[in-house]
Image (cartoon, grey):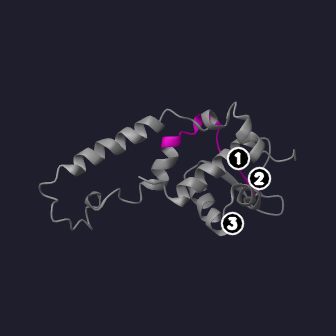
Amino acid sequence: MRLTLRTNLAMRALMFCAVNNDRIVRKSEIAATCNASENHLGLVINQLAQHGFITTQRGRTGGIRLARPADQIGVGEVLRVFESCLPFAECFDGAENECPLKGCCKLKGLLSNALEAFYATLDPVRLSDLTGENDALCNILSLEPA
């Protein structure tokens, strides 16, 4: 299993916002610090805003910030938003499933259970668990005070 680049960027952007919670941050600041394309990050930021993880502010002094406290943002919740649009395997895509084994294969059930166990492991983890008391991460992501 491998997370998509969008999911990875979403988590980086959220951690960046959590570390810099006392200010509005700019997409360019996140991109430079997190080694990301601003264009790709823009798509991720849009999706984060649509799902209520961040708020955006337009204009010269605009940027983004967390829409709710970091201890109210679940890692599993974020990953589900970004990963659920892609079927885990061909057999998970009902409309496009052309697997010749679909009527008798037991692997789909095992994979489904494994995927639920993966999310169940991440569901209790909060964004604050990733950033709180993590000096090394804060040193990398922290901006100068506004």
- Determine contact: label 1, label 2, CB under 8 Å: yes
What amino acid type should be assigned to the residue bearing mark 2? Val
Label 2 Cα neighbours within 10 Å, binned few <14 / some 14-19 / many ≥20: many
Disc 1 from disc 2: Cα separation: 7 Å
| Local secondary structure at mark 3 | helix
As drawn, 106 above or below 135: below
Whole-percent x, y for residue 25 in the image = 76, 52
Mark 1, residue position:
17
Is residue 113 toward the left or the right of residue 16 in the image? left
What amino acid type should be assigned to the residue bearing mark 3? Glu
Is residue 14 toward the left or the right of residue 76 in the image? right
- Residue at point 60% right, 47% down? 53
Mark 1 or mark 2: which comes first in sequence?
1
- Determine contact: label 3, label 1, CB under 8 Å: no
- Determine contact: label 2, label 3, CB under 8 Å: no
Disc 2 from disc 3: Cα separation: 13 Å
What amino acid type should be assigned to the residue bearing mark 1? Cys
Q: Which mark is residue 38?
A: 3
- Residue at point 15% right, 60% down? 101
- Whether residue 21 is visible to the viewer of this picture, yes or no, is no
Is residue 103 toward the left or the right of residue 66 in the image? left
Chain part drawn in magenta: 63-76
Mark 2, residue position:
25
Q: Is residue 73 magenta?
A: yes
Mark 3 or mark 1: which comes first in sequence?
1
- Residue at point 24% right, 51% down? 108
- Residue at point 45% right, 54% down? 2
